[in-house]
Image (cartoon, rainbow, N blue to C red):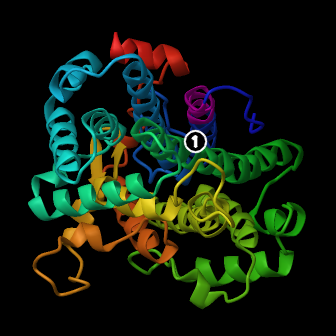
C-alpha cells in the first residue's frame, strides 16, 4: 500500500490520503474500541488522523500549481484577459479570490507582466490568503515572489512563472510521498507483524518488532523515559535534547509501544496522554528526517528555484484544515514574540516553514487544536479527482 504508484502528483496525493485514512482508522480502533468511521472517536486522534488532512492540504498546493501551469499554457497562445476574468473562469470566490487578486496586483506593482502575475496569484490561491489583508504581509509576500520570479531560470516571463509552479509542485509531492513511504510504511509493517504476535504488549513490541534504522536499546530507553512523562502538559517533544544522537526511527518503534500501552489503560485521561506522546514520536521522525530533504535538497534541480526561498514566501499563507476546525500559521505567529522588533514587518513573515526549528513548535500547536476537538478530524476531506480532470473541472 505504501508503494505509491506512478501518476500525476494529484493522483498520487489521492492514493496517499486514502492510504492514511485506512491506517488511521485501523490504529484508532486499537486504542478506542468504540471508534466508528462515521461518528468518529472521543479518544485523542492519532498521528495518522492528522496525516489525512496534512496530505490533503499538500494536495491543495499541488492543485494551485497545476492550475497556474494551465493558465500559463493558455497564455502561450494569446494574452489572458484581466486577472478578474481569469479567476472567474477558475471559479475562485471569497477570500481566495480576493487574496489572489491582491497578490497579482501587488506582483504587477513589482514589475511582473500581467500574465505571469495572474498565474502566480492562482499558484497561491489554494493557500490561506486572509493574511494578505495585512499590508505588511502582502508587501513582503509579493516582494519575495517577485524576487524569485526575476531570479528564476528561463528567458520569457511565462517560463519563469512556470519554474515557480514546478518547484512548488515537486516539493509538495516529494515531501508527501517521502512521509507516506516512511511513516506509513512503518505502520503497515507494524500492522502486518501484529496479528501474528499473540498477546501483544509494549514489551513484545520493544523486543520483537524491528524497523530499519531503529535500535532496540534506544527504543526501550525512549519508551521508559516517555512513559514516565505523560503527566507533562504539553506532551514532551524536545527529543533532540532528551535523546541526543538517538535514531528517530527508534522513537517510531517506541511510539507503537506507547500505543499498545494506551490500549491497555483503564481510563481515558491516561490513554489520551500516551497517544499524544506517541504522536510526537511519529511527528519527530516525519519532520526531522523524512520531509526535510524535500524542503532543502542537497542541490537545486534543473528548472527549479530555491525551495527554501519559495517556502519562505508561502509560510504566512499556510493553514491546516482539520475536518471541522482550522489551524492557521498566521494565527500561531501572532501569539509569538516579535523576532525582529520591527513594527513594519508582520510576525508571520519572520518564519520559514522549510526550517525545522520554525515549523516544529508550530506543528505542535496544530496537534493541540486537534486534541481539543477530537471528533473533528474524522470529518474527512473530499478527495481530489485525477490530475488534469481536476484542473479542467476548476477551469471549465
Vertical position of residue 94 compared to residue 157: above or below: above
Judged from the image, the secondary structure of the residue bearing numbered disc 1 is helix
Q: Is residue 211 above or below residue 24?
A: below
Q: Residue at x 45, y 18 (%)?
A: 390
- State the residue in front, 347 or 36: 347
Q: Residues within 10 Å of mark 1 (few under 14, many from 20)?
A: many
Seen in the picture, residue 9 relative to 292 is either above or below; the reply is above
Out of 85 and 155, give the one closest to the viewer: 155
Highlighted magenta segment, given as a residue range = 9-18
Residue 241 vs residue 373, the one in the foreground = 241
Going 67% across and 89% down the picture, which residue do you hit? 244
In the picture, measured across the screen, residue 151 lies left or right of residue 209, that is left
Screen quadrant of the N terminus: top right
Q: Position of residue 212 (x, y in %)?
A: 86, 62
**Residue 117 visible:** yes
Residue at 64% of width from left, 52% of height from top?
Answer: 179
> With 253 as the anchor, is 117 left or right in this view?
left
In the displayed structure image, the side of residue 311 where residue 275 appears, left or right: right
* The C terminus: image quadrant: top left
Q: In front: 232, or 336?
A: 336
Q: Residue at x 57, y 51 (%)?
A: 304
Q: Is the residue 240 above or below the residue 290 in the image?
A: below
Residue at the outermost front position: 155
Q: Which residue is mark 1?
A: 24
Q: Is 19 situated left or right of 193 in this image?
A: left
Q: Main secondary structure of the magenta part?
A: helix
Amino acid at each position: 500500500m505504501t508503494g505509491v504508484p506512478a501518476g500525476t502528483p494529484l493522483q498520487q496525493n489521492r492514493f496517499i490520503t486514502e492510504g492514511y485514512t485506512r491506517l488511521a482508522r485501523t490504529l484508532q480502533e486499537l486504542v478506542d474500541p468504540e471508534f466508528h468511521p462515521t461518528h468518529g472517536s472521543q479518544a485523542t486522534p492519532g498521528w495518522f488522523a492528522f496525516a489525512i488532512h496534512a496530505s490533503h492540504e499538500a494536495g491543495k498546493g499541488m492543485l494551485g500549481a497545476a492550475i497556474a501551469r494551465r493558465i500559463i499554457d493558455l497564455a502561450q497562445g494569446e494574452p489572458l484577459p484581466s486577472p478578474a476574468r481569469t479567476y472567474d473562469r477558475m471559479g475562485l470566490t471569497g477570500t481566495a479570490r480576493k487574496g489572489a487578486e491582491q497578490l497579482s496586483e501587488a506582483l504587477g506593482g513589482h514589475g511582473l507582466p500581467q500574465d505571469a502575475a495572474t498565474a502566480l496569484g492562482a499558484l497561491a490561491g489554494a493557500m490561506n490568503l486572509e493574511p494578505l489583508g495585512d499590508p505588511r504581509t502582502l508587501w513582503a509576500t509579493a516582494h519575495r515572489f517577485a524576487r524569485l520570479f526575476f531570479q528564476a531560470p528561463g528567458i520569457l516571463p511565462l517560463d519563469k512563472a512556470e519554474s515557480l509552479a514546478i518547484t512548488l509542485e515537486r516539493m509538495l509531492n516529494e515531501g508527501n510521498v517521502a512521509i507516506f513511504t516512511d511513516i506509513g510504511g512503518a505502520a503497515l509493517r507494524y500492522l502486518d507483524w501484529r496479528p501474528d504476535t499473540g498477546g501483544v504488549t509494549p514489551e513484545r513490541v520493544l523486543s520483537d518488532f524491528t524497523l530499519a534504522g531503529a535500535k532496540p536499546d534506544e527504543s526501550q530507553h525512549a519508551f521508559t523515559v516517555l512513559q514516565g512523562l505523560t503527566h507533562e502538559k504539553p506532551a514532551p517533544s524536545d527529543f533532540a535534547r532528551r535523546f541526543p544522537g538517538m535514531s528517530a526511527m527508534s522513537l517510531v518503534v517506541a511510539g507503537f509501544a506507547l500505543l499498545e500501552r494506551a490500549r491497555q489503560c483503564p481510563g481515558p485521561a491516561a490513554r489520551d496522554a500516551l497517544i499524544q506522546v506517541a504522536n510526537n514520536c511519529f511527528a519527530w521522525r516525519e519532520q526531522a528526517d523524512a520531509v526535510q530533504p524535500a524542503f532543502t535538497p542537497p542541490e537545486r534541480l534543473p528548472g527549479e528555484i530555491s525551495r527554501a526561498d519559495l517556502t519562505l514566501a508561502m509560510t504566512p499563507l499556510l493553514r491546516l484544515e482539520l475536518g471541522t476546525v482550522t489551524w492557521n500559521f498566521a494565527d500561531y505567529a501572532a501569539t509569538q514574540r516579535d523576532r525582529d522588533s520591527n513594527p513594519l514587518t508582520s510576525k508571520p513573515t519572520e518564519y520559514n516553514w522549510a526550517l525545522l526549528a520554525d515549523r516544529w513548535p508550530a506543528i505542535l500547536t496544530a496537534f493541540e487544536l486537534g486534541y481539543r476537538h477530537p471528533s473533528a478530524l474524522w470529518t474527512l476531506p473530499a478527495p481530489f479527482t485525477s490530475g488534469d480532470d481536476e484542473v479542467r473541472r476548476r477551469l471549465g
